[in-house]
Image (cartoon, helix red, strand yellow):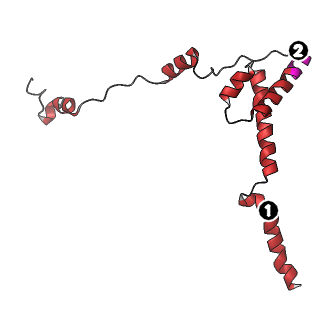
Amino acid sequence: MKRLLLALPLLAALSACEQLGIDDPAKVAAAKEAEGKAIGSACRHAMRAIEDCYVLNPKAQKAAIYAGWREMDEYMRENKLEGVAPVVPRPGSARAKEDEAEAKPAEKPAEKASDKTAEKTPEKGGDKAKGR
């Protein structure tokens, strides 16, 4: 009876391996496959070419992206659905470069330390107070 009581917590801990960070390789592969299909179908719905989808998602499985893209294409054709124009430009395109340029604030050159000392206020007896 004592052995059974000692074995129960051990069995409970071993059955919760996922909580310890030990992932089942089959579950990880299935999750990557599902994510790739979701990416592919989203790309098709956004009227992106399959090649663009590969470029935008280099870490995703290409076969899964293609399967999702193809399934969404069939679905959209059967239901006569129109795609949605993509908002995010393709990396490296002229529009992407323009968007990046607009997003960055104009960088001002750093002020020199000598400029700061020359602009002292009159109360502190700087050069401006003497009329220089």
Q: Where does label 1 land, which residue?
A: 16
Q: Where does label 2 land, which residue?
A: 80
Q: Quadrant of the C terminus?
A: top left
- Indicate the position of residue 103 as horizontal and vertical percent values: 50, 23
Q: What residue do we see at 47% from left, 24% from top?
A: 104
Q: Quadrant of the N terminus?
A: bottom right
CB-based contact (under 8 Å), mark 2 and mark 1: no
- Indicate the position of residue 107 as horizontal and vertical percent values: 38, 25
Give the quarter of the image for residue 17.
Answer: bottom right
Residue 71 lies within the magenta run: no
Amino acid type, callout 2? Lys
- Indicate the position of residue 78 as horizontal and vertical percent values: 91, 18
Residue 77 lies within the magenta run: yes
Q: Residues within 10 Å of mark 2 (few under 14, many from 20)?
A: few
Q: Nearer the viewer, residue 80 or 55?
A: 55
The numbered mark, 2 or 1, whose residue comes first in the sequence reads: 1
Q: Which residues are magenta?
A: 74-78
Residue 114 vertical placement versus 50 (above, below): below
Residue 15 vertical placement versus 126 (above, below): below
Q: Does residue 38 show up?
A: no
Q: Residues within 10 Å of mark 1 (few under 14, many from 20)?
A: few
- Decide if residue 25 is on the left or right side of residue 113: right
User: In whole angstroms, how far apart are the C-alphas of marks 2 and 1?
Assistant: 46 Å
Amino acid type, callout 1? Ala
Q: What residue do we see at 76% from left, 54% from top?
A: 23
Element under label 2? Answer: loop
- The residue lying furthest to the right in this view is 78
